[in-house]
Image: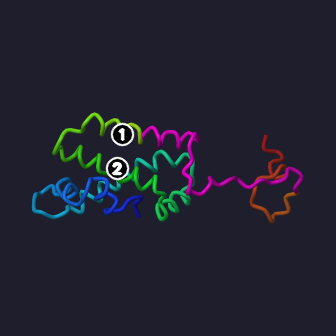
């Protein structure tokens, strides 16, 4: 599952006609599904690359199944940006490149913890085990008694 859908890409492209112009690589008047799939995959990889340091794989899977509006927008706009670069229909304008850099900076701020996606799950916390707990074999966690003799 991808963060964005083809419908999100149509909106980011500026409508159905512009979207078709971008993704019809063989000029047969039809959407090239492999181009759309590759663009979405590349956008997903870019987002995952930035979010992976802040979230677990389970949270990334949850976010893909329930993408926030911000993540949908970033994924769709990055996918369209990539298609425009591949297609070379028109040169990437300075404004488009600036918006791309802003999206990358936003993902970077999420990556270092300066920003958090509002609707995303909180990063999972490691379970705290009281230092006075005795290791009776019922816990799988690390305890002081369990580490005796390790150093």
- The quarter in which the N terminus is drawn is bottom left
In the figure, is residue 140 to the left or right of 103?
right
- Image spot of residue 129 (x, y percent): 80, 54
Mark 2 and 1 residues: CB-CB less than 8 Å, in contact?
yes
User: By what rule are the colours in the image chosen?
Assistant: rainbow
Residue toward you, 17 or 65: 17
Would you name the residue on which mark 1 appears? Answer: 99
Query: Residue 57: which quarter of the image?
Result: bottom right
From this viewpoint, which residue is outermost toward the front? 15
Q: Tell me what residue is drawn at x 89 percent, y 52 percent.
A: 132
**Residue interval drawn in magenta:** 104-133
Would you name the residue on which mark 2 appears? Answer: 77
Residue 123 drawn in magenta: yes
Residue toward you, 91 or 134: 91
Name the element at disc 1.
Answer: helix
- Image spot of residue 12 (x, y percent): 31, 53
Q: Residues within 10 Å of mark 2 (few under 14, many from 20)?
A: many
N-terminal of the pair, mark 2 or mark 1, is: 2
Q: Is residue 90 above or below residue 118?
A: above
Q: Is residue 86 above or below residue 28?
A: above
Q: Tell me what residue is drawn at x 20 percent, y 61 percent.
A: 32
In the figure, is residue 87 to the left or right of 58?
left
- Image spot of residue 61 (x, y percent): 50, 61
Give the CA separation, mark 2 to mark 1: 9 Å
């Amino acid at each position: 599952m991808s963060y964005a859908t083809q419908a999100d890409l149509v909106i980011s492209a500026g409508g159905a006609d512009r979207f078709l112009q971008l993704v019809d690589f063989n000029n047969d008047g039809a959407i090239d599904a492999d181009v759309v799939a590759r663009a979405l995959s590349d956008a997903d990889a870019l987002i995952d690359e930035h979010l992976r340091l802040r979230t677990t794989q389970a949270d990334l899977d949850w976010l893909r199944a329930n993408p926030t509006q911000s993540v949908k927008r970033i994924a769709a706009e990055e996918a369209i940006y990539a298609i425009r670069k591949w297609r070379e229909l028109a040169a990437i304008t300075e404004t488009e490149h600036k918006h791309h850099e802003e999206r990358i900076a936003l993902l970077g701020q999420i990556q270092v913890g300066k920003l958090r996606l509002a609707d995303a799950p909180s990063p999972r916390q490691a379970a705290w085990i009281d230092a006075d707990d005795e290791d009776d074999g019922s816990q799988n966690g690390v305890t002081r008694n369990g580490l005796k003799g390790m150093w």
